């Protein structure tokens, strides 16, 4: 009887040890996965963020609704300014921005909502105004227009690039994300350079926010948008970001951040700078 007890006890101990080892392995695996969310422990800079709008379709842009009367097709935002940004990510809707919570061993095991008073530490946000001006016959209603991003061709089009002066291993442009919304509810995200090689030398990962379920417009390093789910009006351009009505000033909120879940968001990009241009194009779609 005593011998059976010892064998049973030894068997239970072996199972217990195996269970503990497996549990530890699982913890280590989970730690490695969460750490990969935010490998950037320092900062990067947003600098020389500019905005260019195409005049196709009589599309005009301004920093406020009153400025639309000037009928400008180009507006510069934050040019020459420097803003230090910590990495962050979004919730599934893109509306709420989340900051990492670091454990004692620098592992990111959770996130928290970024308070409005702290948002300038994590993302750059500004409002712009768009309007398509059209002449209508008496009694006619205004048309609706799809607004898209133009592909990059040379110095023309939409792009996010690394600014001159960054070192060879600094590629902050690879983990930048830009979102757009008209109503504060429905977000669409622009992911430039999505196919660029990661700073580690591995292929870039498709990680536009953990759990983000909205539309992502992916642009290759060559400048063309690929894999668009909606109508593409001009070859290489994005599909529609949103729609606006003609002769109606429309406020659009633009948000720029460094995506902490991207494998390119690493310590090596600290103090690097980016330059960006967003080119909007309008397309008449319906009366």
Image (cartoon, rainbow, N blue to C red):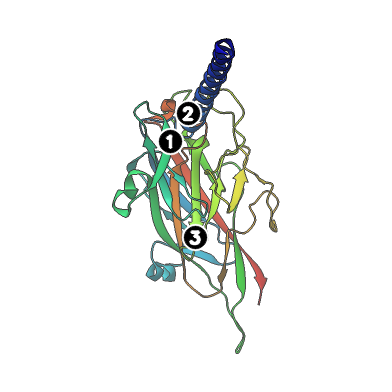
Near mark 1 (Cα within 10 A), the count class, few <14, some 14-19 or many ≥20, is: some
Eye-nearest disc, 3 or 1? 1
What residue would you read off at disc 1? 109
Label 2, label 1: how many angstroms apart (C-alpha)?
A: 7 Å
Answer with mark 2 or mark 1, whichever residue precedes in sequence: 2
Please name whichever residue, 215 or 235, is drawn nearer the observer in this view of the structure. Answer: 215
Up/down of 255 relative to 163, above or below: below
Give residue 263's position: percent from left, percent from top: 52, 31
Residue furthest to the top in view is 3
Answer with mark 3 or mark 1, whichever residue precedes in sequence: 1
Give residue 221's position: percent from left, percent from top: 60, 37
**SS for callout 2:** helix
Residue 181 - label: 3
Considering the image in quadrants, where does the N terminus appear? top right
Q: How many marks?
A: 3
Considering the image in quadrants, where does the C terminus appear? bottom right
**SS for callout 3:** strand
Instruction: Judge from the rendering whether residue 8 lies leftward or rightward of residue 81; answer left or right.
Output: right
Label 3, label 1: how many angstroms apart (C-alpha)?
A: 29 Å
Q: Which residue is drawn at the image coordinates 68% and 48% (left, top)? A: 236
- The answer to whether the residue labelled 3 contacts the one labelled 2, judged by CB atoms less than 8 Å apart, is no
Up/down of 243 relative to 214, above or below: below
**SS for callout 1:** strand
- The answer to whether the residue labelled 2 contacts the one labelled 1, judged by CB atoms less than 8 Å apart, is yes
What residue would you read off at disc 2? 31
């Amino acid at each position: 009887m005593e011998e059976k007890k010892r064998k049973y006890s030894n068997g239970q101990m072996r199972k217990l040890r195996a269970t503990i080892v497996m549990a530890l392995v699982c913890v280590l695996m989970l730690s490695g996965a969460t750490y990969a969310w935010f490998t950037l422990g320092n900062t990067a800079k947003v600098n020389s963020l500019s905005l260019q709008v195409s005049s196709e379709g009589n599309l005009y842009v301004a920093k406020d609704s009153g400025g639309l009367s000037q009928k400008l097709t180009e507006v510069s935002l934050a040019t020459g300014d420097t803003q230090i940004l910590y990495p962050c990510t979004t919730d599934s809707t893109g509306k709420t921005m989340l900051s990492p919570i670091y454990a004692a061993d620098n592992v990111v095991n959770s996130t928290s909502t970024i308070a409005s008073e702290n948002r300038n530490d994590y993302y750059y946000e500004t409002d712009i105004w768009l309007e398509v001006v059209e002449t209508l016959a008496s009694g006619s209603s205004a048309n609706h227009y799809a607004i898209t991003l133009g592909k990059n061709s040379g110095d023309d089009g939409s792009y996010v690039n690394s600014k001159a002066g960054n070192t060879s291993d600094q590629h902050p442009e690879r983990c930048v994300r830009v979102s757009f919304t008209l109503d504060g509810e429905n977000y669409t995200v622009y992911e430039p350079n999505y196919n660029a090689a990661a700073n580690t030398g591995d292929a870039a990962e498709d990680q536009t926010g953990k759990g983000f379920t909205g539309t992502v417009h992916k642009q290759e390093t060559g400048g063309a948008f690929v894999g668009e789910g909606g109508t593409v009006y001009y070859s290489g351009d994005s599909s529609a970001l949103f729609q606006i009505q003609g002769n109606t000033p429309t406020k659009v909120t633009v948000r720029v951040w460094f995506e902490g879940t991207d494998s390119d968001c690493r310590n090596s990009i600290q103090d690097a700078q980016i330059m960006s241009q967003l080119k909007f194009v309008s397309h008449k779609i319906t009366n």
